[in-house]
Image (cartoon, helix red, strand yellow):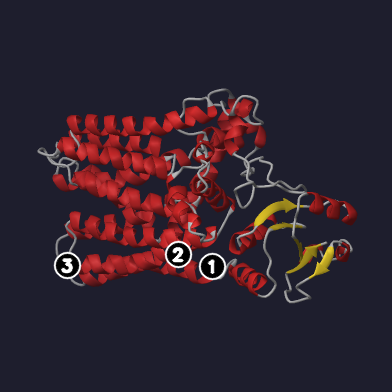
């Protein structure tokens, strides 16, 4: 399913595809996903299709990475086969229903955790360098993984020291990995500084904190950016103009004065922070149950047995798996969380559960128990995929007909429904200048003409709001229930 986030990653990819590299640097939207989209957009593939192609390729690599992780965890081949079968609905639902870098994050973290398990006393420098590069890849995939890597990697070396394990990074491997990560990351931090004039790894966090400041309440307020509603904006080399949320927290930005609040500022702020955490914990629990009803119990068992066996080699592996979702969710749980943010927890729950089964002594129907356990990780994602598979599918079919039958091209605008029109625009390969919702028909026509708009989309809910025939000729002649398209004359 496409969202405003999807359109923004496509927007950045269009800048890269058109050689606008300095403009494409963005402190809010991480670059890696847009880099993967850019070659397809350069080749003329529309952004929505490019997202699906890239996600399918990433999903295939996730399956391969999951197989490698299972092998590193010494899981039985039969169990690994069942794990991969159970992963297909999860990966398919993520690939087809999530159009943001979150599947890429799953890939990077799965590979990262596997390589953490490949550390031994003789390869600390090489593995440290490799893990540092993977941390950098994670940072470019999603800015949140910058603090995650610092927290998680530090936690790993501490756990190794406590467990006295031969696996995992020692202080030498930790130092090498951290140095490589910071050196590589500094290159992108300098790119952000060159554009925005601030030294920061990202402005996503400050925007999120400002959005959820005490003065804005607890009800997940929207980012106050001015997308082209009730006005037209020429997008230039892009398919649609989308403002940069980073500007909101730079000097003079609308949210600049709201981003530095702390729960220690006073009682109001503390109660607000507790309220945010309560909502976030509720959402986290909801999404983990949707991944599998056994996921949360599995995580608790992982934590319990990792503490119980921490002084043994097997305990360190369990501790690594248990620590990963804790570190991943720790930042989100203080502000806001969505299911796509924590997809990697599915990987930890499924592989961690199998690792626990592996450590148990043989018992009757053990294979059956493993199969039932893994089936719970497949059923809910499969249902999610089936229920949501056709969401927004009509827009692609409508766009295909508008292109082939009616020859819609050039610049378009619409009465309302910004997101739906923007998706049509991607499928059509046109330029979407925005919506005009609150203006008289004559004024609408003047605006359309002055901006060189070729076609005007009138959505069903707006058909009775004006005499749209004054705009021009309706070319669709009632072919669609949801909309009518007028050629601007």
Q: Are marks 1 and 2 in contact (CB under 8 Å)?
A: yes
- The residue sitting at 55% across, 45% down in the picture is 279
Q: Residue at x 22, y 37 (%)?
A: 128
Q: Are marks 3 and 2 in contact (CB under 8 Å)?
A: no
Report, in whole angstroms, how far the alpha carbon at label 3 lies from the one at label 2. 34 Å
Residue position marked by numbered label 1 in the rendering: 388
Residue labelled with disc 2: 93
Residue 213 visible at all: no
Q: Residue 403 in the image: state x and y as whole percent.
A: 64, 70
Q: Earlier in the sequence, mark 1 or mark 2?
A: 2
CA gap, disc 3 and disc 1 = 40 Å
- Tag 1's secondary structure? helix
**Label 2 crowd bin: few (<14), some (14–19), many (20+), radius 10 Å:** many
The residue closer to the viewer here, 176 or 84, is 176
Q: Secondary structure at mark 2?
A: helix
Mark identifier at residue 457: none
Disc 3: CA contacts within 10 A as few (<14), some (14-19) or many (>=20): few
Residue nearer the viewer, 99 or 163: 99
Can you identify the residue that label 3 sits on? 363
Mark 3 or 1: the one toward you: 1
Element at badge 3? loop
* Front in this rendered view, residue 281 or 126: 126
Quarter of the image that includes the N terminus: bottom right
Q: Using the image as rendered, state which of residue 212 and residue 454 is in the foreground.
A: 454
The residue at 20%/37% (across/down) is 169
């Amino acid at each position: 399913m496409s969202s405003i986030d999807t359109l923004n990653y496509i927007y950045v990819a269009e800048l890269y595809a058109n050689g606008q590299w300095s403009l494409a640097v963005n402190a809010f939207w991480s670059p890696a996903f847009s880099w993967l989209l850019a070659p397809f957009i350069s080749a003329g593939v529309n952004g929505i299709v490019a997202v699906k192609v890239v996600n399918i390729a990433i999903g295939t690599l996730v399956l391969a990475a999951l197989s490698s992780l299972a092998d590193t965890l010494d899981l039985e081949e039969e169990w690994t086969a069942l794990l991969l079968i159970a992963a297909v609905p999860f990966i398919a639902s993520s690939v087809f229903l999530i159009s943001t870098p979150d599947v890429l994050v799953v890939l990077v973290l799965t590979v990262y955790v596997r390589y953490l398990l490949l550390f031994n006393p003789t390869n600390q420098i090489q593995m440290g360098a490799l893990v540092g590069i993977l941390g950098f890849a994670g940072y470019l995939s999603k800015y949140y993984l910058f603090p995650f890597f610092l927290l998680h990697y530090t936690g790993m070396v501490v756990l190794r020291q406590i467990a006295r394990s031969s696996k995992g990074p020692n202080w030498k491997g930790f130092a090498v990995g951290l140095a490589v990560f910071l050196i590589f990351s500094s290159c992108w931090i300098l790119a952000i500084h060159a554009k925005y004039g601030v030294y920061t790894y990202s402005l996503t966090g400050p925007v999120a904190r400002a959005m959820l400041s005490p003065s804005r309440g607890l009800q997940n307020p929207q980012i106050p950016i001015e997308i082209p509603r009730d006005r037209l904006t020429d997008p230039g080399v892009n398919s649609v103009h989308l403002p940069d949320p980073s500007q909101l927290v730079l000097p003079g930005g609308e949210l600049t004065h709201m981003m530095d609040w702390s729960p220690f500022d006073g009682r109001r702020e503390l109660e607000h922070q507790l309220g945010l955490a309560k909502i976030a914990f509720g959402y986290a629990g909801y999404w983990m149950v949707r991944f599998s009803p056994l996921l949360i119990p599995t995580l608790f068992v992982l934590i319990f047995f990792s503490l119980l066996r921490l002084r043994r080699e097997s305990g360190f592996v369990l501790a690594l798996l248990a620590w990963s979702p804790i570190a991943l969710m720790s930042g989100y749980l203080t502000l806001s969380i969505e299911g796509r943010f924590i997809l990697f927890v599915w990987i930890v729950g499924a592989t961690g559960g199998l690792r626990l089964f592996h450590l148990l002594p043989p018992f009757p129907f053990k294979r059956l128990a493993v199969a039932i356990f893994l089936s719970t990780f497949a059923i809910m994602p499969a249902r999610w995929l089936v229920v949501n598979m056709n969401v927004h599918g009509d827009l692609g079919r409508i766009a295909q007909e508008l292109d082939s039958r009616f020859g819609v091209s050039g610049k378009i605008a619409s009465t309302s429904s910004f997101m739906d029109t923007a998706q049509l625009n991607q499928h059509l390969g046109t330029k979407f200048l925005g919506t005009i919702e609150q203006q008289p028909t004559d004024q609408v026509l003047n605006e359309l003409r002055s901006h060189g708009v070729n076609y005007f989309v009138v959505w069903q809910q707006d058909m009775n709001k004006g005499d749209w025939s004054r705009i021009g000729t309706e070319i669709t002649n009632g072919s669609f229930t949801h909309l009518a398209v007028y050629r601007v004359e």
